[in-house]
Amino acid sequence: MATIVSLDPRVTRMEIEQDPGSAPEPKAELDQFPTFEVFHQERTGAHHVHVGSVHAPNADLALLLAKEQYGRRGQTVNLWVVNTRDVVTMSAGDADIFVTTPEKTYRDVGAYMVRNKVEAYKKQMGDQKS
Amino acid sequence: MNQDAVKDLLVRMADDVLILAHRHSEWTGLGPVLEEDIAFSSVAQDKLGHAQALYAILHEHFGMPDPDVMAFGRAEDDMRSCHFVELPNGEYDFSLVRHLLFDASEYVRWSALRESSFEPLAKLAHKIHGELKYHLYHAQTWIVQLGSQGSEESKARMQSALNAAWPYALGLFESRSGDADLVASGFFPGEDALRAEWEVLVQGILEKSSLTMPHDHAAVLGGRDGYHSEFLAPLLVEMTEVYRIDPSATW
């Protein structure tokens, strides 16, 4: 029986038959590992920021694999992983709870008058120096 | 400093890690799951970097050819790798066991080399310590999973891979005639001392993995004198294929 000859020598070495004779077994549904959410800390003292998820059979392996998926470039000092099942979330349909929030500008930091006081203080300090 | 002894030590360390880097890289694209494929390939990349750093020391301080020529330009009988790193990958069980036994040895060796009287080597040892810690962590996590937390089948497969790998792994610690000078000058602690420390480290990991450490085996030797397993020659053909098209090409 002829086997597959590939430009990739590793594939050639596997001696895969060119004509498998029968169709491959269909893949079972939902045969993947569960997912874990990954949180990445760039510097000591910085917040852990959610950066994505990773498939793994358990938390130990999730942390191990997260190191490579999310810590392979740039700066990292620490990682957290959390089983996606353990994340408690609001329903997407409840987004209307927040619809009027942007109108409440009196809650925005810009609405506070502290800025004026700070500016006045800075000016006063500047005047004293000069 | 006994220059011949130093070259012998650094070349065999570099060749081991170069050949194993190539073996590890053969999993790229074929790993058991995507994330692990990437992780294992990154370990291979790190290993290649360690080989390059050692060849660079040999080039700069001991007048040996540049790293590319050392890696790709030598004949089989000029290579000093041990048989352990030459063996084909087999299934993932064997590759993981080899990864554990090799990286436990690297961790012990390079941890000790941080105290080497030869400063360039001590500096390199400090630089790569974190990488080796991760390589050992990666190997150990998998072995513990598949040994003590996996199925009967996974445990049995890890144990038989371990039994098969063991006599070859002992070949990592073959003592050489010049080693005594290097031990006396504080260059490195000697292969026997490293092996003793390695056995303690491996024993601890295997206990956590519910696996049994093999014993009473003779080490498989020969590579340090240029006598290699049948698997090295085809590996070199494949590894040097691009280099041989044009050795002077720059990338």
Image: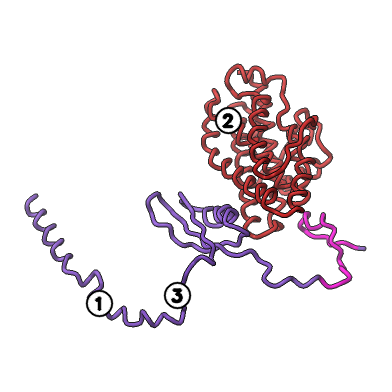
Chain colours: A purple, B red
Percent across and percent down for residue A109 are 24, 69
Percent across and percent down for residue B246 are 71, 46
Is residue A113 left or right of B90 when viewed as pictured?
A: left
State yes or no: residue A16 in magenta. yes
State yes or no: residue A81 in magenta. no
Q: Quadrant of residue B192 in the image?
A: top right
- Same chain letter for marks 3 and 1: yes
What's the amino acid at mark 1? Thr
Does residue B226 lie above or below B163 as drawn?
above
Instruction: Tell me, for residue B60, which label it has, or none.
Output: 2
Name the residue that disc number 1 marks.
A105
Can the viewer see residue B143 in this picture? yes
- Disc 2 and disc 1 in contact, CB within 8 angstroms: no
Does residue B159 lie above or below A68 as drawn?
above
Q: Nearer the viewer, mark 3 or mark 1?
A: 3
Name the residue that disc number 3 marks.
A90
What's the amino acid at mark 3? Met
Q: Nearer the viewer, residue B139 or A123?
A: B139
Segment tinted magenta in the rendering: A2-24
Is residue A121 left or right of A7 when viewed as pictured?
A: left
Q: Residues within 10 Å of mark 3 (few under 14, many from 20)?
A: few
- Magenta residues, dominant SS class: loop
Q: Nearer the viewer, residue B27 or B14?
A: B27
Q: Nearer the viewer, residue A72 or A113?
A: A113
Q: CA distance from mark 3 to mark 1?
A: 24 Å
What's the amino acid at mark 2? Glu
- Disc 3 and disc 2 in contact, CB within 8 angstroms: no
Q: Residue furthest right?
A: A1
Give SS at disc 3. Answer: loop
Q: Quadrant of residue B16 in the image?
A: top right
